[in-house]
Amino acid sequence: MPNPTEVVNEAHDQSNNEEKVTVLSDSTKPFVGLAFKLQQDKYGQLTYFRVYQGKVTAGDTIYNISNESRKVRVPRMFRMHSEDREEIESAEAGDIVAFYGVEASSGETFTDGKVNWTLTSMHVPAAVISLAVAPKDRATETNFSKALNRFTKEDPTFRVHQDEESQQTIISGMGELHLEIYMERMAREYNCQVIAGKPQVAYRESITKRAEINYTHKKQTGGSGQYAKVLGYIEPLPADAVESYEFVDDVTGGSIPREYISSCDKGFKEGVKKGTQIGFPIVGIRCAVNDGASHAVDSSEMAFKTAALMGFREAYAAASPTILEPIMKVEIDAPTEFQGSVVGQVNQRRGVILETVAGDSVNVTCEVPLNAMFGYSTDLRSATQGKGTFTMEFARYAIVPKQEQEEMKKAYREKVAAEAKK
């Protein structure tokens, strides 16, 4: 490991518009530390800290800058060894220590309150696979909730949310094995057997051409009504765009009062949450508003939000919407005699081979749609007498073949119709 004094570490000053500041490995400076790992044992939660700057002593009060500057007291502190642990009174810049009884999540920054800095957070990739899970026995629901709460704290790539429509608990992660391990841990550590639904791939929707927005929202009821007119356009963002959604305000001459512009943005954001093709979020889209009309009495924030949302849906249907699927970068290692079987399996799964390096073993780098990777670990072991291994990471989103798109749209329409009958 490099000497901590020879490494330049940067933080963001939350009191000064996230300006970059250098964290010095100096025990005389204000304390700055990062919680980077959580571990549960028979005594409770053990939080591993790296002290980047300053000094911390048992009994000190420190602040969780990443979580609303919550105040916590440092109870017992340990230096961890491979076999045992040594209780210590203080730690200074460059030390890695563990605290008992400090509530934190992985990647959160703590200081002594003298500085309001957060250390650069880890890159957390987007989840690519989801499963609907539920406890097998209703009596273990409390343990089920405890397990999910703990796992989300210790692993930023593991996400949990409640599906609004089905009320199912959905867990999302980096791959089939990732989620299988957590379900196994629930059974082993929390005595909670889990039933899992079919894996759900994180598809996305997008548009392929520009379309105009021209929508007037009128509603007359007793008293004041609702009136808003929104004109603009939607268009695809460039392939190299960082953001997946962009709002452009091109309104001139006050045709839409300034206080209602943000309502148009909210309407568009509501629209991109769920596409009409297969019900997944819409990405890679620029929404612009450039004209409109308002009424002195009947216009309101809600009226403009509704006009923007309905205008977006009309334009979306005219913008040649398409479905995108996650493409994974897969690296496969296997003995050379199985090269033909490995390549054949990749081709069967709509994979594209990028590079093949052969020696004592063959290393194949390829891109394969995630939807085609279910059960691949079993197939690879069967084809290579158990000697083949692979790693997989998210690469990009790409358009789903037309025939598959039609099947997906049909299945989604049938699902919506079935839910409407209930």
Image (cartoon, grey):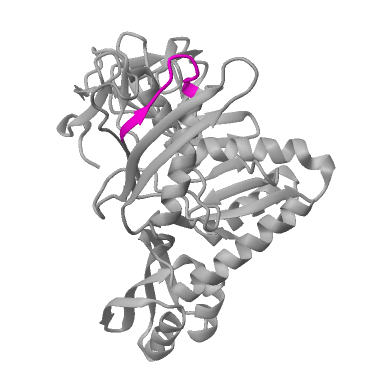
Image position, residue 361 (x, y; %): 33, 82
- Quadrant housing the N terminus: top left
Q: Is residue 194 visible?
A: no
Picture residue at 31% right of the left edge, 49% below the top: 235
Figure check: 193 above or below 247:
below
| Quadrant in which residue 66 is drawn | top left
| Quadrant in which residue 97 is drawn | top left
297 in magenta: yes
Image position, residue 248 (x, y; %): 28, 35
137 relative to 383 in the view: left or right = right
68 in magenta: no
Image position, residue 113 (x, y; %): 36, 9
Figure check: 350 above or below 213:
below
Picture residue at 43% right of the left edge, 20% below the top: 295
Picture residue at 69% right of the left edge, 37% below the top: 145
Image position, residue 147 (x, y; %): 65, 40
Magenta-drawn segment: 290-301
Depth check: 355 or 326 in front?
A: 326
Figure check: 243 above or below 94:
below
Figure check: 259 above or below 335:
above
Depth check: 290 or 122 in front?
A: 290
Q: Is residue 376 visible?
A: yes
| Quadrant in which residue 106 is drawn | top left
